[in-house]
């Protein structure tokens, strides 16, 4: 297939201009790489959710993508301060919104493109992302397999944080009790009881960073 003469070819052109691998590009759209590959091959049309993500993350002109009749409004992912799209380091490590996931210090890294305004006023290189597994935070709209963005520079104060307790990585709401030197670890799901980390166990407790937002994965 040559030229931008089909939705499939134009979709492939956006992926190529992103500079990402096929797998990383699919993850940035919240879809399985097989689904992304099928779109590139013309075996299926991009869903409405994918079209919205292409417009929001990559600045794609959807009319152009679907018809080829408009200019491509695409901002390449780069370190250019004027670019509307920036890259965030995605640690291929699951953070459990439930019982906890084992920390893998050798976890692979990838890059996820997002709008600069999504992480502002923080610098993109000071933001990290992990995938959430579990349902303990559904009360705030954080669902299984969503991608959570957090700031490692912000570790104090009550709020939703990525934390580690022992060898477990979790996403939880925290309430600090400075008088008792304790931290209450709270789920946003009534099925999960709060957990209180007392002073004696605080050496096993670490705040990795404050959650600043999340991105829903497309459910096929």
Image (cartoon, rainbow, N blue to C red):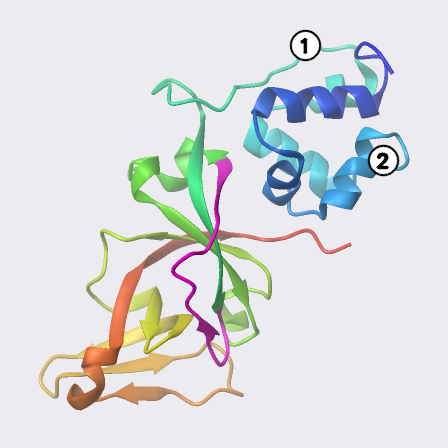
Which residue has dot 2 on it?
Answer: 45
Name the residue: 38% across, 48% down: 128
Looking at the picture, tell me which residue is in the foreground, 3 or 123. 3
Residue 8 in percent (x, y) is at 82, 25
Q: Residues within 10 Å of mark 2 (few under 14, many from 20)?
A: some
Residue 22 in percent (x, y) is at 67, 35
Part of the protein shown in magenta: 96-113
Looking at the picture, tell me which residue is in the foreground, 108 or 68. 108
Which element type, helix, strand or loop, lies under badge 2?
loop
Quarter where residue 209 is shown: bottom left
Q: Do the residues labelled 2 and 1 touch (CB within 8 Å)?
A: no
Which residue has dot 1 on it?
Answer: 71
Name the residue: 58% across, 25% down: 18
Residue 127 in magenta? no
* Quadrant in the picture for the N terminus: top right
Residue 214 in percent (x, y) is at 48, 53
Please tell me whether residue 83 is drawn above or below residue 143 in the rendered image: above
């Amino acid at each position: 297939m040559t030229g931008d003469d089909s939705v499939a070819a134009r979709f492939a052109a956006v992926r190529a201009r992103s500079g990402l691998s096929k797998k990383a590009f699919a993850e940035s759209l919240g879809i399985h790489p097989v689904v992304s590959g099928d779109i590139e091959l013309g075996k299926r049309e991009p869903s409405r959710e994918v079209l919205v993500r292409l417009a929001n993350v990559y600045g794609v002109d959807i009319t152009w993508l679907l018809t080829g009749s408009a200019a491509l409004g695409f901002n390449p992912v780069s370190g250019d301060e004027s670019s509307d799209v920036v890259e965030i380091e995605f640690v291929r490590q699951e953070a459990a919104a439930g019982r906890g996931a084992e920390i893998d210090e050798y976890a692979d890294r990838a890059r996820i493109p997002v709008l600069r305004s999504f992480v502002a006023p923080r610098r993109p290189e000071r933001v990290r992302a992990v995938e959430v597994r579990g349902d303990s935070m559904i009360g705030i709209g954080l669902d299984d397999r969503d991608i959570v963005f957090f700031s490692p520079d912000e570790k104090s104060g009550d709020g939703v944080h990525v934390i580690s307790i022992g060898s477990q990585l979790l996403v939880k709401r925290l309430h600090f009790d400075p008088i008792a030197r304790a931290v209450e670890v709270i789920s946003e799901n009534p099925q999960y009881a709060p957990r209180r980390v007392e002073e004696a166990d605080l050496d096993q407790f670490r705040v990795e960073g404050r959650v600043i937002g999340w991105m829903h994965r497309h459910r096929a």
